[in-house]
Each structure stands twice: as structure tokens, then as C-alpha cells.
Image: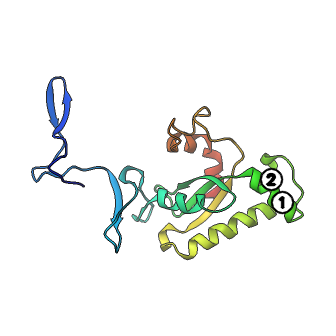
Amino acid sequence: MVRSPSLMLGYIVRGQVEKIKTKEGWFATGDTGFIDANGFLSITGRIKDNFKNSFGQYVSPIRIEKKLELEIGVERSIVIGFQRPFTSTIILPDFEFLQSWAEAQNVHWTAPEYMVHNPDVIKYYQSIIDEINKKAQVHERILGFALVADEWTADSGLLTSTLKLRREAISERYEKVIREVYN
């Protein structure tokens, strides 16, 4: 929530001002964040993207996705866990990196759709997840994952035009993969 004397009064809808502030003058942005020790505000995600797992604990998927996507070899990821017993993720590997990694590790390179099932590749991504889990809260630890080889683009319908995840579309596309992660 933010408050400022320069904050707009509202939106004009059908000639009327639709107020957006509370009585006290606050505006609900829908963002989540924190103020650090130096007084700087960091936005960490959107409230609407958070989900509650089957134990009633809230998980911020964007925060976990950002950590995953900082790792070498991860192009994109989506964190899943709404009303599920644990948090999981689907990872789209960076195949350019993965090909170089495979050559350096003497792992036979083949098409991406086969590489996502290679035990050595899976072990590599499990090591990334293990490192992230060391610093995560218990209910935010990733306990299952899958690698996929499809392109995530706006044209494929999996990203918006501003390159944000279309969570519902991704969940629908990978429904079978998600079921396998939770079985």
C-alpha cells in the first residue's frame, strides 16, 4: 500500500471518478515487498501470484522463480503448489548452455526433447534446486521438478507480450507433466 499527496484520486469510469484510495488515503498496489536495512523498498512480486499450499502456507512463486532463473542453465521456470502437498517447478533449460555443459561433461548431446530426460542433466538441475532449497523456508522448498523442451514465447501463448508467465496457460499445457511430478 502507498500513500502520497500526489497520488491520483481515481479512475474516470463513465464520467464518474471511481475512487481507488481508502478513507485514510492509502492505495492498494497489489505488490509484495520489503524495506531493507538501508530503507530501500524492494518489490518482490504480486499478491495475486502467491498461492496457498494444501497445508495453508503461503508461497511466493515469483521469488523462487527469480532465484532459479539466476542460475546458469535455467532459461525460465514456473513454481507450482496451489493446494498441493509440496512446492514444485517446471524448468525450461537454457539449451545453448546445456549443450556446452554436456560436451564438457562427456554427456552425449541429442535433441532437447530427449536431453530433458537424461539422468545426468536431471542430476545437474537437482543440484541447482538443492542449493536453492538450503536457503528456503521449509514450505517453499522445491521437492519435485520437471524439465521441458518447448519454447516459452508470446507466440506460443505461454508468455505475455511483456514476457511475463501466463501461469494458467502453462499449467494447462503441462497438466500431464505436473501430475507426474506429484505422483
Secondary structure beneath dot 2 equals: helix
Q: Are marks 1 and 2 in contact (CB under 8 Å)?
A: yes
State how far apart marks 1 and 2 are (Cα).
9 Å
State left or right for residue 47 relative to residue 97: left
Q: Please name the amino acid that badge 1 sits on.
A: Ala
Q: Position of residue 99 (x, y in %)?
A: 81, 54
Q: Which mark, by number, is residue 115?
A: 2
Query: Image quarter for residue 51?
Result: bottom left
Secondary structure beneath dot 1 equals: helix
**Would you name the residue on which mark 1 appears?**
102
- Indicate the quadrant containing the C terminus: top left, top right, bottom left or bottom right: bottom right
Q: Position of residue 72 (x, y in %)?
A: 67, 61
State left or right for residue 130 relative to residue 37: right
Look at the image and name its color scheme. Answer: rainbow
- Indicate the quadrant containing the N terminus: top left, top right, bottom left or bottom right: bottom left
- Depicted 140 relative to depicted 89: above or below: below
Q: What residue is rendered at 19% in x and 41% in y?
A: 8
Closest to the observer, 119 or 56: 119
Closest to the observer, 47 or 168: 47
Q: Please name the amino acid that badge 2 sits on.
A: Met
Closest to the observer, 139 or 105: 105
Name the N-terminal-most of marks 1 and 2. 1
Q: Residue furthest top?
A: 14
Disc 1 or disc 2, which is closer to the eye? 1
Q: What residue is rendered at 87% in x and 60% in y?
A: 103
Q: Position of residue 57 (x, y in %)?
A: 40, 65
Q: Position of residue 158 (x, y in %)?
A: 57, 39
Q: Callout 1 environment at 10 Å: few (<14), some (14 to 19), or many (20+)?
A: some
